Image (cartoon, rainbow, N blue to C red):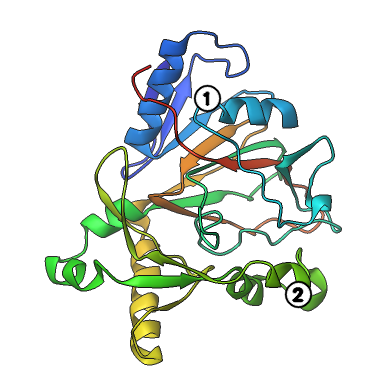
Amino acid sequence: MQVKRIGGALGARVDGIDVLNEPDPAVWCAVRAALVEHSLLVFPGQSLDPATMETFGEHFGPVLAPTWVTKANFAPENQKIFVLSSRPDRMRYAGSTWHSDYSFTEKPADLSWIHLHKVPSVGGDTAFTSTRAAWDALSPRMQAYLDGLVAVHDNAHRHKLQYMSDDAPLTRTELAQLPPVKHPLVRTHPQTGKKALYVSEALVERIVGLPPRESDATLRFLHEHCAQPQFGYRHAWTVDDLVIWDNRCTNHTAVQDFGTEEIREGYLASGYFTADLDK
């Protein structure tokens, strides 16, 4: 197995491994360590279906079952595996603002991974940004101000930004099942001990304890700060790429720059990082 950095702030390409047939526990230890180090890993040339998407995730920990999402958006044979598709009857605009997956829940996903088996002829990238690098780049005074603040994450906020009323993947009733939750604005990564911003334009509605103008101004600054190119990596998909990333220290967004006649399609899953790094 070879691991090669592909971005300055995050990202590495992993070659020489077939994720479906790799039996050696030591190799998976190395994969987990590489993910902790680089925050994002790209495995080219992998062939996965819904069942093997789940099997892959189990090398890191339990795979999340998002019971609040409409079942029609998941693979019929596996309700843990989300079907990403730009087809007219699917969720073309899903993920088109910066976010960390499922931060609107009490126990957000540690990890997410995507496998695409159809890609547009041009465009359709996914952009990632390191919120750990963004935190490190802040001045000590700004870090002192932010550390200890709490933000409100609300899935309804994203739907206001991304969807028309007739294009929403969740009904009002389904959204009501997910009341807003609160998370620290700055989180400490359990494996590295390093701090990262935990904020996104898609899902953070406000900062607790600040007047609206101060909250809005602070969030606007943080969204613009995190989106700076020096903190990012933009993945140009090829067929059968598998990409896994760490939601605890990255944000991502789907780039909607391809024609409506083009199809971008694959699988998305999320889960938790509970496996040991050394065994």
Where is residue 236 shown, x and y percent of the image? 56, 42
For marks 1 and 2 on the same chain, the one whose residue lies earlier in the sequence: 1
Query: Looking at the image, which residue is at 26% across and 68% down?
Result: 148
Establish if 42 lies above or below 97: above
* 74 horizontally vs 24: left or right: right
* 181 horizontally vs 172: left or right: left
When asked about the image quadrant of residue 63, the answer is top right
Between 128 and 51, the residue placed more toward the observer is: 51
Between 170 and 254, the residue placed more toward the observer is: 170
- For label 2, the residue is 172
The extreme top residue here reads 24
- Disc 1 secondary structure class: loop
Residue type highlighted by circle 2: Arg
Establish if 219 lies above or below 193: below
Where is residue 275 shown, x and y percent of the image? 44, 28
- Quarter of the rendering occupied by the N terminus: top left
Instruction: Give the number of the disc on residue 59.
Output: 1
- Disc 2 secondary structure class: helix
Q: Residues within 10 Å of mark 2 (few under 14, many from 20)?
A: few
Residue type highlighted by circle 1: His
